[in-house]
Image (tube, helix red, strand yellow):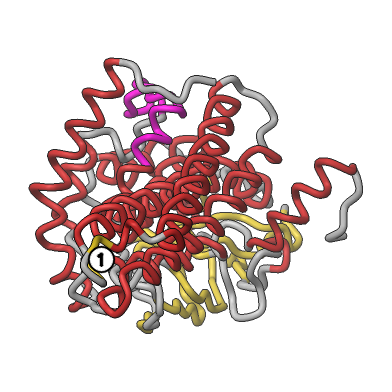
Amino acid sequence: MNLDLDDTQQLLRDSIRRFMKAEVVPHIQRHEAARSFPFELMPRLAELGYLGGTLPEADGGQGIDYPTWAMMMEELGYHWLSLRTMVNITNGSIHRLAAHGTPEQKRRYLSPMLRGELRTCTGLTEPDTGSNIAGIQTRAELQGDEWVLNGRKVWITNGLQAEVAMVVARTFSPTCDGALSCFLVDRRETPYDVRKLDTLVLRCTGTAELGFSDLRIPRANLVGAEGKALAGTLKGLDAARLNIAMGAVGAAQSALDLSVDYVRQRQQFGRPIGSFQLVQKHIVDMTVRVEAARALGLRAAHALQAGKDVRQACSIAKLYATESAHEVASMALQVHGGLGYSEDYPIERIFRDTRGGMIPEGTTEIQTLIVGREILGINAIA
């Protein structure tokens, strides 16, 4: 496994960094205060390969390999975890449509998503269903040429602003008796209830509750085969966990860099606080966690690129990187003292947002059980 970037990857990273510093960083604080998101950035991110970039060129992607993609996710996390999250959510819809969409669905929805022109979300989590996707209770019943949806989805990232929702529901039709299917729900054509949910973490990602009450959508809005959504959803989790892991690595690296600069400059008792042994211990512990998390993430990325079974590798990467990132952010806040509490300085935001990585795409506890199952061959869940 190579931890170094080749020339092409370095050029891409440099382009991303220039874009982030010029177009993103100056506006983060304003958007955080307003809890808004700069959707105008999405077409620019599409040009850099962030939307569907790992898809083959024949499917509208750029054929980006997973180690390069891991680096790209780290760069997003380094600058703004809300931005990485919105990219990840958009890519979830892109990859599902690329794999299972009809030609008409791809024309109407996939193409504008790839260009960054269509806002989307994925409706999985429900009031009584989180990590156990198989427990979804939202219903879709076929009535003539329409599906009738009933149910609620909660904690839906970008649900507030999404124009199109990819909703997973328990399906009832002459050929399907309760298995899970995926549906395109176009809010512009069939409006549904949306309620904003304010959160501690990732405040700019438009988290919302979605409500469907006898909502009728065209029969043609079924994505893929009836009753096959569970397998498709689980298949996409490995790459999504890698994305979260590398975003966490980026955020942790940002917290570390800010801390190194601060302890070199901050004076107490007539000398830089970086000269104090306990402060240096924080910096060393932070560095070890960042380096280890990056290595685990890249290990998973190389395995994913090689087509190997990566359930264990991606779960380990997400488990370690997300927990370590929040630990690093906590140490960074400690090093910065009172300044770390200020919303005018990035540490406060990094501390909040790194906490957000331990729950989506399977909680820390679920990742632990997955890894245990892969090691022992014994399933502790069911």
Residue depicted at x 60% and y 26%: 303
Q: Which residues are magenta?
A: 55-73
Q: Compared to 265, does 138 lie above or below?
A: below
- Residue hosting label 1: 346
User: Could you say which quadrant of the image residue 342 lies in?
Assistant: bottom left
Q: How many marks?
A: 1
- Where is the C terminus found, in terms of image quarters? bottom right
User: Residue 4 falls in which quadrant of the image?
Assistant: top left
Residue 76 picture location, percent across and down: 31, 47
Question: Which residue is pictured at 15% across the width and 53% down the height?
Answer: 24
Looking at the picture, does residue 350 appear above or below residue 235?
below
Task: Return the x and y of residue 132 as percentages of the image width and height.
Answer: 70, 64
In the image, residue 148 sits, relative to residue 51, either above or below, namely below
Vertical side of 255 occupied by 250: above or below: above
- Which residue shows up at 61% across the image and 55% down it? 181
Residue under the point 41% across and 29% down: 55
In the image, taking residue 124 as reference, residue 41 lies left or right, namely: left
The residue closer to the viewer here, 379 or 196, is 379
Q: Residues within 10 Å of mark 1 (few under 14, many from 20)?
A: many
Q: Quadrant of residue 44?
A: top left
Q: Is residue 106 magenta?
A: no
Pick the residue in front: 286 or 55. Answer: 286
Q: Residue 69 in magenta?
A: yes
**How far across and down, in percent of the image, does residue 168 sit?**
57, 61
Most foreground residue, 110 or 369: 369
Q: What secondary structure is marked by label 1?
A: helix
